[in-house]
Image (spheres, coloured by chain):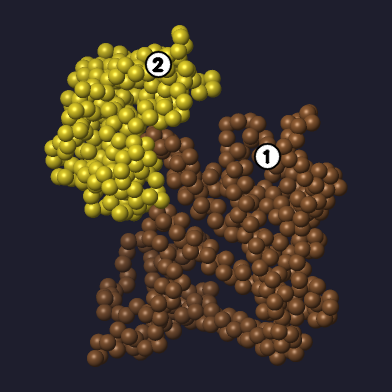
Amino acid sequence: MSSAVTTVAQSAQQSAPEPAPASAVAESPTAAAAQSAAAPGAAAPAAPGAVDWPAADYSGYKLVPARHPWRWVGTVMVALGVVAVAWSLATNPRWEWGVVAQWFTAQSVVNGLVETLKLTAISGALGFVLGFILALMRLSASPLLVSVSWTFSWIFRSTPLLVQMLLWYNLGYLYEKISLGIPFTDIRFFEVQTTTLISQFAAAVLGLTLNQAAYSAEIIRGGILSVDQGQLEAAAALGIPAWRRSTRIVLPQAMRAILPTAFNEIIGLVKGTSIVYVLAYSELFYTVQVIYNRTQQVLPLLLVATLWYVAITSVLSVFQYYIERHYSKGAVRNLPLTPLQKARKFFATHAPVNLDRAKEGR
Amino acid sequence: MSAVIEGPTTAAPAAAATRGHVDITNVRKSFGSTEVLKGVSLTVPPGGVAVIVGPSGSGKSTLLRTINHLEKVDGGYITIDGQLVGYQVRGNKLHELREKDILKQRTDIGMVFQNFNLFPHLTALENVTEAPVVALHRNKAEARKRALELLDRVGLKDRAAAYPRQLSGGQQQRIAIARALALDPKILLFDEPTSALDPELVNEVLDVIRELATSGTTLIIVTHEMGFARDVADTVVFMDEGQIVEQGSPQEIFANPREPRTRSFFSKVIEPAFNI
């Protein structure tokens, strides 16, 4: 039985790369049809409907999946490449892993990391809230709200972030004082020096938030547009109030379209915060720069920053996976397996020894 | 399907027999330069079953959607039990109501759509309980209990935890009917409820509607199912080009249509085997 199986598998493998079908294969009806279709001039070997092969019963045969030798070759090559890179990373002394390890958890670096996380969290959250409002404005029936929202996105998407940062930081040069009062009168409820209001931190948050809002407004608008109009109609017909229609019916469905791009933006923002170095704001990247300017260990310290960015992105990616999974409820017939469940299933079905058989043997 | 046929469930629908009088007066509506309703008037008495038939583009669905103010009228008015839909009288003008008041009116008017429009991210049960809790401020446990009764009534109590995409088209439409019933509406509007269904699923939905026809709720149904229209209707309304061409009992309309337009329409849509 097993020898018969291997011969079938071998002949299938041999015939696969050859363009002209071997005589044994040509007997099958599909191959014959393919042949006649490829060469219409040639006479068809058999009239349609005429059966000129012996009736066969394959019910006792075992099914053998096709083998893919090139896949294995490819896998081995890639594995060799990975090993080579890893080897050079580990053995080349110029990477100075010792220095990396020394600075990785240094107090100043950790402080910088905290600042980076703070900037990302605050401007990410505020940016998306403002973006949500801008998206609703853009989708509203009021021409004024639509054009204000459009203009906001237009301006902030067309100005370099660097310029925005410097502009906010130097706002005190343009407007010495910021005050709240009644326009065209001398009545002031409150007045403050711009330079005391706009610190480095405030300028950084302001710049990142407004810029982020312009981009996330478009992302959220796209998500809302992807939800079927009938959903709103059905909700309206059921007497569900407008705010609830947005938050309970439309937004959860829009999230599926919003999330992948939104996480792209947040991950971009994590690294984008490094631009606040122009304000001499000591977040992760600026801190690292300050250190290597002093110690001249440029590459190892850049590596320290890189490893932290990789760590943040990895954590965010895990969040992304589970949040996306949460919002795919009802959108797919059955929820996809989590990586953990997948791994469990893989080891259950691809175990080196057949567990089922081992159990039966007992 | 036996669950569906089993008699009236609660006392609530029986009480509804005294309400749900729909009066449509000279309603006009245009989309751009196309006039889709050219002065339509129709009266459906409480507990009545009106079936609107007619060719595509005749304005049937638009008329139905004006009844719950999903479509604003350009002229004319609609009343339910004497109360204007979507407007209030101030002086000698009809002022459009605020959104909040329109939503309140809509809780008396259930609607079932051609494409079901179930909320795909909510389970069958959540679909049915959403509106009673949010729009009628019922408490959750009570709404849930009532929803399960309604799911039982449409024969889907065991699928309460399923998401719409895990259900067949016929099952989805039956959930949509339960969702509309959850507000205890005076009136139910059906916009081609079986047009998106495979032929073998049509009957399970029609059976549910048939059962509702005897419950005392006013039904206004747009459909292409002529056999069903004949079975279930008190009044059959034939519309063409934005006007009601003819209306009457199923016997009158199907057996002896007076208008040539009605006759030519039925000769196209009713197979020869169909006999009155």
What is the quadrant of residue A341 in the picture? Answer: bottom left
SS at mark 1? helix
Depth check, front residue: A50 or A309: A309
Q: Using residue B251 as the reference point, say whether residue B241 is left or right of it.
A: right
What label sits on residue B169 in the rendered view? none
Q: Residues within 10 Å of mark 2 (few under 14, many from 20)?
A: many
Q: Which chain is yellow?
A: B
Relative to A143, does residue A155 appear above or below in the rendering? below
The disc numbered 2 marks a residue on which chain? B
The answer, for residue B55, to whether it is visible in the render is no
Q: Residue B152, how many percent across, how many down?
A: 21, 46
Label 1 resides on the chain identified as: A
Name the one closer to the observer, B262 or A196.
A196
Residue B113 x, y percent position in the rendering: 36, 36
Residue that mark 2 sits on: B77
The structure residue drawn at horizontal position 26% and vertical position 76%, both measured from the top left corner, is A59
| Type of the residue with mark 2 | Tyr
Q: Is residue B166 above or below residue B78?
A: below
> What amino acid type is highlighted by mark number 1?
Trp
